[in-house]
Image (tube, rainbow, N blue to C red):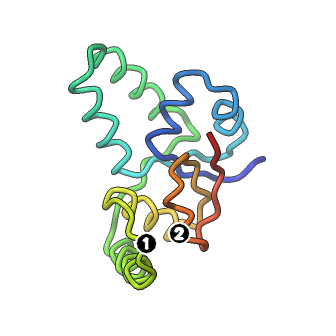
């Protein structure tokens, strides 16, 4: 499955932990995008973890791979965020704020989301690779 993906925090962890499904998706993707929010979530976890420096080093090497790109929010991202927020609120299916930022970046950059979080199912316009 060779699609450009944006990753959620849980799927980065799966990749680093060697979960075969995750490794296969990462290897097949011509472009792996990491939303800024995911970078922040991972670094926060490293900051309070017992192997923070080691995990940070692995992550830094990952970010410097040629196919990996960090997605930064822009003013355009805020418009997607607002539209998705309205859609979710109208449907009564809110999702966590950080995940709403991830979703906005996925829509903005026309990517496939790689996540295990079922609440993204409330956004049918986002193509997903999921599963446990």
Where is residue 98 shown, x and y percent of the image? 33, 56
Q: Provide the secondary structure element on which disc 2 rests.
A: helix
The quadrant in which residue 19 appears is top right
Task: Classify 10 Å Cα crowding around label 1: few (below 14), some (14-19), many (20 and above).
Answer: some
The quadrant in which residue 25 appears is top right
As rendered, which of 85 and 107 lies closer to the eye? 85
The structure residue drawn at horizontal position 41% and vertical position 28%, both measured from the top left corner, is 59
Residue 66 is left or right of residue 93, and the answer is: right
The structure residue drawn at horizontal position 57% and vertical position 55%, both measured from the top left corner, is 113
Residue at label 1? Answer: 93
Residue 2 is left or right of residue 67, and the answer is: right
Where is residue 30 shown, x and y percent of the image? 68, 45
Task: Classify 10 Å Cα crowding around label 2: few (below 14), some (14-19), many (20 and above).
Answer: some
Residue 58 is left or right of residue 48, and the answer is: right
Where is residue 126 shown, x and y percent of the image? 59, 67
The structure residue drawn at horizontal position 42% and vertical position 21%, both measured from the top left corner, is 58
Where is residue 39 shown, x and y percent of the image? 35, 42
Question: Contact, CB < 8 Å: mark 2 with mark 1?
Answer: yes
The structure residue drawn at horizontal position 46% and vertical position 47%, both measured from the top left corner, is 34
Of labels 2 and 1, earlier in sequence is 1
The image's mark for residue 22 is none
Question: Looking at the figure, which quarter contains the C terminus?
Answer: top right
Residue at label 2? Answer: 122
Using the numbered discs, state the Cα–Cα distance from disc 2 to disc 1 in whole angstroms: 7 Å
Q: Provide the secondary structure element on which disc 1 rests.
A: loop
Work out whether 48 lies above or below 99. Answer: above
Work out whether 66 lies above or below 109. Answer: above
As rendered, which of 130 and 108 lies closer to the eye? 130
| Residue most extreme to the right | 1
């Amino acid at each position: 499955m060779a699609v450009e993906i944006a990753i959620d925090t849980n799927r980065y962890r799966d990749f680093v932990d060697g979960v075969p499904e995750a490794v296969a998706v990462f290897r097949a993707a011509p472009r792996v995008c990491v939303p800024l929010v995911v970078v922040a979530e991972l670094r926060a976890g490293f900051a309070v973890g017992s192997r923070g420096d080691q995990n940070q080093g692995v992550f830094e090497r990952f970010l410097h791979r040629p196919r990996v790109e960090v997605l930064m929010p822009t003013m355009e991202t805020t418009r997607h965020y607002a539209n998705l927020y309205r859609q979710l609120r109208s449907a009564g299916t809110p999702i966590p704020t950080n995940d709403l930022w991830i979703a906005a970046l996925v829509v903005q950059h026309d990517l496939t989301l790689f996540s295990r979080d079922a609440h993204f199912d409330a956004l049918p316009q986002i193509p997903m690779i999921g599963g446990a």
